[in-house]
Image (cartoon, rainbow, N blue to C red):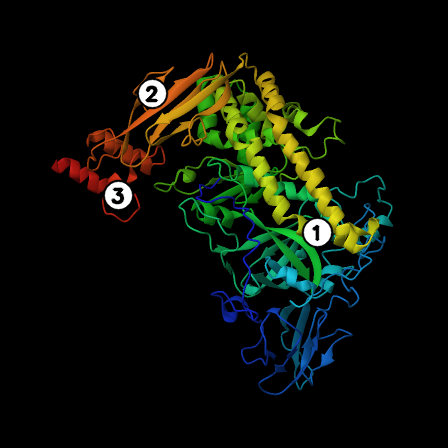
Amino acid sequence: MKSRNRLFAIALAVVVSSAAILPSYLDVTYEDNFKIHAAEQESLPVFSSESGFYGADFALTLSVAGDGDIYYTTDGTDPCDSETSQLYSVPVTVKDRTNEPNLYSKYEENGTAQSVSRGIGYKKPTFNVDKATVVRAVVKNADGTYGSTVNHTYFIKSGKLSQYKNMTVVSLVTNPDNLFDPDKGIYVTGNQYIDWQNSSSYNPEKSVWDTDNISNYFSRGREWEREADITIFESGSVAVKQGMGIRIKGASTRNSAQKSFNLYARSEYGASKIKNPLLPGNYSIDGKLIEKYDSISLRSVGDEVRLRDSFAQGLVHDRENLTTEDMKPCVVFLNGEYWGMYEMAEKLSDYFIESNYGIDKKDVAMLKNGEQEEGAQEESDNFLNFAYSYAQKNLTDDTNYKKVCDFIDIDSMIEHYAAGLYLGTFDWPNYNYAVWRNTGEAIDGNKYSDGKWRFISFDYDYTMGATYGSFGGVEGYQYDSFLHMDKSKKGAPTCLFVKLLKNEDFRNRFAAVYCDYANEVLTEKKANNMADHYATNYSDMLASTQLRWWGFFGGTPDGLIPYYKRTYQNETLNGIRTFFSKRAEYTLNDMKEYTGLQGTLQTVSLKADGNGKIQINSIVPDISQGKWTGKYYSDCPVTLTAIPDDCKIFTGWSGDVNSSSMTITVTPEQAVNIQANFSYSAAVEYDVNTDGIFNCEDIIMMQKFLLGAGELNDWKAGDMDGNDNINIVDLCLIKEALLNL
């Protein structure tokens, strides 16, 4: 993952309220973000009011400089050919259109080419969904030709639409045929499915969820990308407005009625980047807020199971060796109609690696679910061939094990499998994974550029107890993820992971990290805090979404909203709470049996005298308020590292272990109590290892830090030029200082 200083990335930017009624662009100009593809001198309609949230109905004036008539629509249809297109002559009344009939929410599973799903019994909503007013206007020239269409989206806050002013709202506007036309519409089954259904090759036994179905919404690639106008509102104001390409996203979920989208910024649509910090708290490894994206995903969450992904990723997000996606909730309106709650997320791509890890995207190779995603095909083939090949070798042999460690970042693999196994991920492990590496030259100071393959974890939908009633009939917290994984041990990359567990060093490192997850990363307390957060910030949005997509089961809109909220909070979230309250007991024993550990769980207690921290294996628990305890197996060594605070030095370990070494290894054959002792020291200039002496050891520590092979005990002592950044210049200066000394 990305090392970041923040609370949750998913701290949900369900945004602060705006006092302003009229919207304003946030450091984004129309010219920067929305380029019209037309002749340079093209006449375009001019709107008297920009997109945004308004306090009451108002009159919108349209004008054009030069000759030509203006035609417009207010229902999201194309003014060039829509039956509802009107010649502009008087100001347009912008209002809440919720009480008007549904135009796009009318599509359902009807067995025709315009079905939005198959085999799930989806029915259109029986009520009018919330609607913004989308005004689409175009100039018709004297010769009968049309110019480019200009789109604006308006929300009237005096009615129901007021609830959206404090949310992140995405208005997606596109020609309806791009979505619902039987031949080219990306949201429907399409004629190609109907033709197959009526052919001799039709297989009625084929699952409608199979990812190789030939429905329009299962089709992939640029051929199935459509142009759309995207407006993103934050706190009632326009944050982004630009043309983008849209595609349907996902695997089997493409058959869901509420579908996910990928959005692509391309110069052919306007701007090649989205220049906005869309995801608050999304920082790169160098601590900089990511302010540009080339693509984003909108993940549907109409089924509450889909919300488990962001929940789980929020719990593991700050793991240094685990790559995850940042995301936040938003509400989508499609051509002005309420489409429900989505998760706006980073899209896994070469640019994702570039923006997060500082690797030039041209040097990124990525394999996703066994298929090439980025880079040359030979790179993906190389990874898979290596995995299969070394899964057949003796990995207890040091030479073979070293080759694996040189090929794959072992810590990344351990984190990936520890998270997936502990969370009880069902549709995994040889699916819903990705690996990537840098194919270019290593970058000084960037450990992620070393050319090793690293894992990306995503799509934690079916985790934390989901689906187990149907798949095995046990409570979620009892689910044996290791036996589930074992069924996939012949496939890559799991074949290599399972074989690596035969190596004692790898097994012990994995077991130690797995216990870290139980003791600190995925604890009941953290899960409860996250569940409280989701109950407060997600329930209303989710309930409205479920009403939009599943309300046909009965009841009235007003009655179903409280029902959906109660169900989510009392069943789903409480089920997740129960999962984490009992998970450690079962999964640690499953891990022990699968890996062949023979010991028993023993208590390791840590505390500090003086100001400092203690790292145990992969975690740095909070010991500032007193003693921390965790449980580790008696035949599995744990590694402890003392971390002094600024202006402190480590003076040694005491308790059941006595040592002056900053890093020690302990095998807890019985309960142990260990104390790290720190004291103030007279500051020694350039003493980066805080041992009280400035000598060659400090130079060595600086070199290791810059190579990504260690940390500085006191980085300020090594900041020779005082620019709050440690680089090769500081190394040269500190060497010069030692020579002068």
The residue carrying mark 3 is 719
In what element is the residue under mark 3?
loop
In what element is the residue under mark 1?
loop
In what element is the residue under mark 2?
strand
The residue carrying mark 1 is 259
What's the distance in space between the residues labelled 3 and 2, CA to CA? 29 Å
Residue 398: x, y in percent?
44, 18
The residue carrying mark 2 is 653
Amino acid type shown at disc 3: Asp
What's the distance in space between the residues labelled 1 and 3, CA to CA? 51 Å
Asked if 738 appears above or below 216 in the picture, the reply is above
| Residue positioned 70% across, 57% down in the render | 339
Residue 527: x, y in percent?
58, 36
Number of labels in the image equals 3
Give the position of the C terminus as an image quadrant: top left
Label 2 CA crowd tier, 10 Å (few <14, some 14–19, many 20+): many
In this view, the mark in front (3 or 2):
2
Amino acid type shown at disc 2: Trp
Label 1 CA crowd tier, 10 Å (few <14, some 14–19, many 20+): many
Marked residue nearer the N-terminal end (3 or 2)? 2
Residue 617: x, y in percent?
44, 26
Asked if 457 appears above or below 189 in the picture, the reply is above
Q: Looking at the rendering, which quadrant does residue 73 occupy?
A: bottom right
Asked if 407 appears above or below 585 in the picture, the reply is below
Marked residue nearer the N-terminal end (1 or 2)? 1
Most foreground residue, 415 or 244? 415
Asked if 406 appears above or below 45 in the picture, the reply is above
